[in-house]
Image: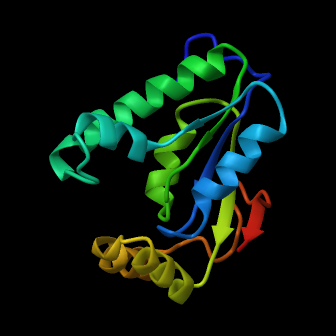
Amino acid sequence: MLCNPNFDSTLYHTVGLCCAGKSTYCNTWAKEKPMRAIICPDDFRAVIHEGEPFISSAEKIIWCHAQYAAQSLLHRGYDVILDATLTTQNQRDDIRMWHPVVEPVVIHAPLEGCIKRANNNGKEDVVEMIKMMCDRWDYDNYYDKDKKKVSQRYL
C-alpha cells in the first residue's frame, strides 16, 4: 500500500467473466466525470507481449505495472477502475492491498452471452477460459469480504 495514500480517491475494480462487458462499462464510467482513469492488465499484456494476449510467466510483471500505474494515479487524486476479471476472492484480496479505499463493481452477464461475444469478436481462444472462470466464480452473494453490498451491473 502507498506510504501516503490519498483517501479522496477510490480504486474500483470490476468482477466479471471475459467478454461480459467490463471494458464497455469502464469506458462509459471514465467519461462520466473528470479525474477518472482505467487501468487494464490486457493493455499491459498487449504492449509487453507484443500482441500476445496471455503468457503465464509474465503475469507478475503485468500486475506489478498495473499496480504502480493505479497507485500513481490514485496518489494524484484520480479515481481509478481496474478493468479485470477478478472472479476469485484471492484475486480481489490482492487488489485490496493497493489502496485503502477499494470498491468492487460486479458485471453480470450470462455464460452463453460471453461465449457468443467471444466467438463473434474472433476470440475463440478464450472460450475455454470463460468456462473455467464461470466454474470458479465465487461472487454469488454480491458482497465483499466485509459484507458490504457492492455495485452490480447486469448486461
Q: Is residue 99 left or right of residue 59?
A: right
Give the residue drawn at x 32%, y 76%: 124
Q: On screen, 131 above or below 54?
A: below
Residue 99, image x and y in percent?
61, 30
Q: Is residue 74 left or right of residue 16?
A: right
Residue 152 visible, this orientation:
yes
Front position in the image: 146 or 126 = 126
Residue at the right extreme?
33
Give the residue drawn at x 45%, y 53%: 91
Label total for image: 0
Front position in the image: 109 or 122 = 122
Colour scheme of the picture: rainbow
Q: Quadrant of residue 48?
A: top left
Q: On screen, 143 above or below 67?
A: below
Residue at the left extreme?
57
Residue 64, image x and y in percent?
36, 31
Give the residue drawn at x 61%, y 65%: 21
Residue 62, image x and y in percent?
32, 37
Residue 144 visible, this orientation:
no
Front position in the image: 90 or 15 = 15
Q: Quadrant of residue 135?
A: bottom left
Quadrant position of the C terminus in the picture:
bottom right
Q: On screen, 86 above or below 100?
A: below
